[in-house]
């Protein structure tokens, strides 16, 4: 993929308590953010959230939204700032910020490098302003789960729900080369980026990326049931989409879910257990949790 400059973005930064991260992430996405990142500040309960907006957000509007969700005192203490970012070569910037990394048996890298070890499976992700490249704990947890499941089960059809950069769909295709993999996202720039990433990784023959509204995307129904569903989103959408996941997952199939904080895991597990899934794996990493749940046969 080519290194190109993009239009300017506006960056919103604020700090909140850990318990508020999920609600604020969702609030910023609903307000129009194209990328939201959350990171722990030191070893305390304070988390810093950074969001990128394609259009200039109104600070007072964001503060009002925060107050409505968190309360006025919490909103006032969030130290919210809005900063204009000039057009930049995001690929070059991200290659500097996120050097190649090894996750499980994968080597996540930009197009300018090659794996140092032939045993590692390369995944090329030249990142942009709205796309992850494997460095976040949630993506890492999902990649570890994919790598672990590869030696335990067969996958003929797989779904990456909320595919973002396409990294999980690509990883699935590389672990199960005969599988048909569908990636779905409702963000047009993510869909375009993921399609380019699929081509760059040589898996366009069995990975299809589509724009759609979750499980309501017509392409999703074409491949039911799925042996594997990956969903690296937020805890609330995971809970809301649990009935859809259960209906689309084949008996004996596996679901990999992340994007949730450690203290949110119990609610996500319970929502899926109520629908006939059972927890078979869990990984807690840097405050975030990845779950593996199987549908009973």
Image (spheres, rainbow, N blue to C red):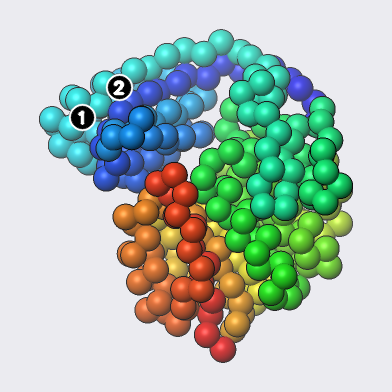
Between 140 and 16, the residue placed more toward the observer is 140
The answer to whether the residues at label 1 and label 2 have Cβ atoms under 8 Å apart is: yes
Q: Secondary structure at mark 1?
A: helix
Residue occupied by mark 1: 75
Between 60 and 5, the residue placed more toward the observer is 5
Q: Counting residues from the N terminus, which is met first, the one under dot 1 or under dot 2?
A: 1
Question: Which residue sits at x=79%, y=57%?
Answer: 174
Q: Is residue 89 above or below residue 243?
A: above
Q: Looking at the rendering, in which quadrant would you find the N terminus?
A: top right
Residue occupied by mark 2: 80
Residue 8: where, in percent of width, then height?
A: 56, 16
Q: Quadrant of residue 249?
A: bottom right
Q: Quadrant of residue 39?
A: top left
For this orientation, the residue located farthest to the left is 73
Is 102 on the left-hand or right-hand side of 207?
left
Neighbour class for label 2 at 10 Å: few (<14), some, many (≥20)?
some
């Amino acid at each position: 993929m080519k290194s190109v400059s993009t239009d300017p973005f506006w960056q919103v930064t604020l700090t909140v308590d850990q318990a508020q991260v999920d609600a604020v992430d969702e609030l910023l996405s609903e307000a129009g953010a194209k990328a939201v990142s959350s990171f722990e500040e030191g070893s305390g309960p304070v988390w810093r959230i950074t969001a990128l907006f394609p259009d200039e957000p109104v600070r007072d509007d964001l503060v009002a939204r925060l107050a409505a969700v968190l309360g006025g005192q919490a909103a006032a203490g969030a130290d919210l700032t809005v900063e204009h970012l000039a057009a930049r070569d995001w690929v070059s910037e991200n290659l500097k910020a996120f050097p190649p990394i090894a996750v499980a048996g994968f080597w996540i890298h930009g197009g300018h490098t090659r794996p140092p070890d032939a045993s590692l499976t390369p995944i090329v992700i030249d990142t942009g302003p709205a796309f992850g490249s494997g460095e976040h704990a949630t993506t890492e947890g999902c990649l570890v789960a994919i790598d672990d499941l590869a030696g335990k089960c067969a996958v003929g059809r797989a779904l990456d729900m909320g595919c973002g950069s396409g990294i999980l769909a690509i990883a699935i295709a590389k672990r199960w080369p005969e599988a048909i993999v569908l990636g779905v996202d409702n963000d047009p720039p993510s869909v375009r980026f993921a399609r380019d990433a699929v081509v760059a990784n040589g898996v366009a023959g069995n990975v299809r990326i589509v724009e759609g509204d979750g499980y309501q995307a017509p392409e999703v129904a074409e491949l039911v049931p799925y042996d594997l569903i990956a969903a690296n989103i937020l805890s609330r959408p995971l809970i809301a989409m649990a009935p859809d996941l259960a209906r689309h997952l084949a008996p004996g199939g596996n679901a990999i879910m992340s994007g949730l904080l450690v203290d949110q895991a119990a609610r996500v597990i319970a929502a899926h257990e109520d629908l006939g899934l059972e927890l078979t794996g869990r990984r807690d990493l840097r405050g975030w949790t990845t779950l593996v749940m199987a549908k009973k046969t």
